[in-house]
Image (cartoon, helix red, strand yellow):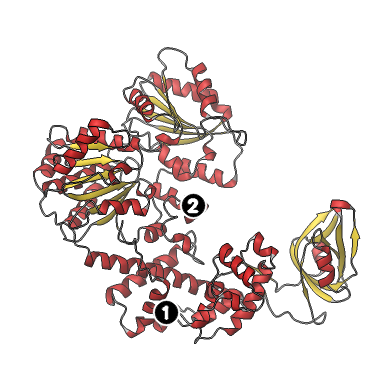
Amino acid sequence: MSQFLREPVSTLPGLGGIKAALLRSELGIVTVGDLIQHYPYRYVDKTLIRTIRDVLTNPDTALVQGILSPFQYQGHGHKKRLVAYLRDGTGTLELVWFKGGKVIEGVLQPGQAYTAYGKIQRFRGKATLVHPEMELLRTATSPRDLTFDPIYSTTEGLSKKGLDTKGIRKLLRAVIPRITPGLVPETLPSELLSTLRLPGRVDAIRNIHFPPSQQALEDARKRLKFEELLFLQLDILLSKKHRNRELVGYVFDAVGEHFNRFYAEFLPFALTEAQKRVMREIRRDLGMGSQMNRLLQGDVGSGKTVVALMAMLIALDNGYQSCLVAPTEILAQQHFQSLKDLVRGMGIQIGLLTGSVTGQARKLTLQYLAEGRLHILIGTHAVLEDPVIFQQLGLAITDEQHRFGVAQRAALWKKSTPHPPHVLVMTATPIPRTLALTIYGDLDVSIIDELPPGRKPIKTELWYENKRLRLIGFMKEQIAAGRQVYIVYPLIEESASLDLLNLEEGLSSLQREFQRPEYQISVVHGRMASADKEMEMQRFQNKETQIMVATTVIEVGVNIPNASIMVIENAERFGLSQLHQLRGRVGRGADQSYCILMTNGRLSDDARIRLQTMCRTNDGFEIADVDLKLRGPGDLEGTRQSGVQGLKIADLREDGAILQSARTIAAKIVDADEHLEQPANLCLKRHLQETRPHNRTWSRIS
């Protein structure tokens, strides 16, 4: 990186210590290089100057030009305002400032020619431009220097110090002309620039801030987005190459008695083609001699648990223990019970370790694990604690891994010597391809994209409050047919700020509607003790209760094939991914299942799209794509610790095609020149070393 780009911003004219410190704390801008990469988030097109007569007839955001009249104050007290008029020969437009009148009077000169830009507002039948952006013209007919004005993100604190969007624009107007290829080195090979028809780096930086035309702006954006995503993918793929080469893994070359016996005698259903494909991928990884680091994606109910069990049986056939770590006690208990049921009669020892396993039970679990008498350990974060010692851990599986911190996952590595365990990461939260290439780009990805045979698609419908009686009747019909019902609420108790039908009110209403002895209700929410939650869930699982009233604690971890209705109250309050997870709690048996989304009808545009998407499709990946477009990558689960937040100009919601191109080109570069030693790639190597000196310290930890 050139000395110019390393210069502190405090060396720039007009940026003293206080302003420089604010830029650092508020926007993370420390150096000139940081300032240059503070890209505009939109632009004001000021190429079209409209007449005032046109503006008065068709009010909108507009740029007008004319002679400024003298100022006058109107109104009193808090209604006092500074008023002036702009005249251009076709009409007169009122300009109003509610704040900063004294400053405006000192800056603007009546009788001079100005351009005024802003949104035209109607006030008492009169067209008014409130707090316009004003720019002095040398003459009434002189051309303006800029056609596009960049708008920069800033903060209230910076604005108070004069570093609003105009202040930042002024800084960059002073810096950008100083940029030359010598001061800002090219980062992409010339052949790549030519092939993709991208501008050089200097031109791209100049034109992203002060574009002379729309085409120049689009070319600059494309170049800088591609550059950002290319280096992200190079970093990921080089890290993956390094891991595959350097990290020796246990060789599981035997597929023996446990695996074969389970497959032949205990497997309760035929594997789908997707499950078979994933098992082949896992078996190949486990036998290669390098550490497996694989992500297993599969929608709710697609059969990931059976695949995980079969991988653990391969580990057992080779003399190694396995662990499966879940984010919640409920989910850990669910896995424990389902795995025990699957291998009952095979002599395989499975242990459970959670926060509620205490006393003698905990002591024996830890003892048997250290002695090797436990083959498989299922647990929560408790598995990561120091007292937990395996005799020989060979395979570590994390479920819904986005709920684990990176350091927590790293703790699993310390429990295996001399090599790290093979790692399988499972998630039922479908991840859009664009995110998978960034968050999990250095993992191999397997997808179970097929539901087990006999499963019927869940019917999802959006119902309003006027169908409440119909809902009660429908629930009674299903219960009479021997089915069970979930009802999920977003809150536990009344909130003054949110007008929600909460769990306590809903429960009271249900108890009035379902008073007869054949209707029993379970209640589960996050504030209950674990033992009480477990008891209520067991009652529901044993069909002692017909209705489960719950908050989102049942989002994961409850597998009740007999439950056929999922009612989600105030569905507009839930995220799309959460709605999809909740829906996945039903549809586990052979009967037709239903998901009823209840709402009071007051829906925002985004809420309407979410609920319509749920009704239209059961495809988790399509749902994840819509979620990404609505919420952006920063709000999706698991991305905050992934590095996606660091993108300065690329947008994963919009730039999937550019990301795919960057991934393909990065893969070709890494395959042909892993160490980036060819002359054409030296600029890539230099930029990677400068911008990612830490070399992704955590990149090898799943």
- Whole-percent x and y of residue 209? 60, 74
Q: Which residue occupies the foreground of this view, 353 or 674?
A: 353
The residue sitting at 19% across, 35% down in the picture is 364
Neighbourhood count class around disc 1 (C-alpha, 10 Å): few under 14, some 14–19, many 20 upward: many
Residue 593 figure quarter: top left
Amino acid found under the numbered disc labelled 2 = Asp
Query: Along the line of sight, which residue is nearer the eye, 562 or 436?
Result: 436
- Helix, strand or loop status at disc 1: loop
Say whether residue 399 is left or right of residue 473. Answer: left
Q: Position of residue 575 (x, y in %)?
A: 49, 44
Return the x and y of residue 471 as percentages of the image width and height.
Answer: 50, 25
State whether residue 140 is above or below residue 42: below
Mark 2 and mark 1 in contact? Answer it, CB < 8 Å: no
Residue placed under numbered mark 2 in the picture: 635
Q: Is residue 296 visible?
A: yes
Quadrant of the rendering where the C terminus is positioned: bottom left
The amino acid on which the numbered mark 1 sits, given as a three-letter code, is Leu
Of marks 2 and 1, which one's residue comes earlier in the chain? 1
Q: Residues within 10 Å of mark 2 (few under 14, many from 20)?
A: few
Residue at (50% x, 40% y) in the render: 574
* Residue position for label 1: 188
Answer with left or right where residue 90 lies relative to residue 165.
right
For residue 168, above or below residue 680: above
